Amino acid sequence: MSKKCGNEQAAILAFIAGAAVAAGAALLFTPKTGREVREKLGEAKEDALEKLKECSSKLRGKKNGGDSMGYDGGDCWI
């Protein structure tokens, strides 16, 4: 593994850690009730899981000789 690859992995890990800290701080300072926050997190989790399943099935299809994913800028993750 080259030094550049290690730096890229460290940067990605730092970004993920920062995002987690920011999300935690946002939850602590939100003006919503706990129930509202839990419902919104549950909805976001379900949406993310659905999009992840959709993207993985598209990748499996591409791996098995199917059509390309038709990538247009990250819509699978948003």
Image (tube, grey):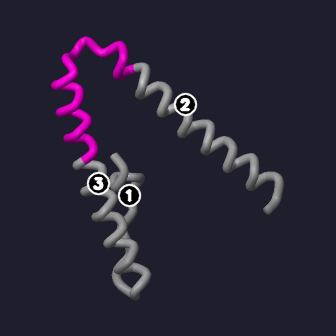
Quick one: label 3, few (<14), some, or many (20+) residues within 10 Å? few
**Which marked residue is nearer to the observer: mark 1 or mark 3?**
3
Point out the residue furthest to the right here: 3
Residue type at mark 2 is Gly
Q: Name the residue under label 1.
A: 72
Taking the spot 37% from the left edge, 50% from the top edge, the residue there is: 77
Count of number-bearing discs: 3
Quick one: label 2, few (<14), some, or many (20+) residues within 10 Å? few
Residue 57, image quadrant: bottom left
* Circle 1 SS class: loop
Relative to 45, is 54 above or below? Answer: below
**Residue 29 horizontal/vertical position (percent):** 35, 13
Quick one: label 1, few (<14), some, or many (20+) residues within 10 Å? few
Give the Cα distance between marks 3 and 2: 22 Å
Give the Cα distance between marks 2 and 1: 27 Å
Question: Residue 18, which numbered label?
Answer: 2
Residue 18, image quadrant: top right
| Extent of the magenta region | 26-45
Taking the spot 79% from the left edge, 62% from the top edge, the residue there is: 1
Instruction: Please check the rendered image and state whether residue 36 is part of the magenta-colored stretch, yes or no.
Output: yes
Question: What secondary structure do most residues of the magenta stretch adopt?
Answer: helix
Give the Cα distance between marks 1 and 3: 20 Å
Relative to 49, is 23 above or below? Answer: above
Residue type at mark 1 is Asp
Marks 1,3: beta carbons within 8 A: no
Marks 2,1: beta carbons within 8 A: no
Question: Residue 49, which numbered label?
Answer: 3
**Residue 41 horizontal/vertical position (percent):** 26, 35
**Residue 22 horizontal/vertical position (percent):** 47, 25
Could you say which is closer to the camera, residue 43 or residue 70? 43
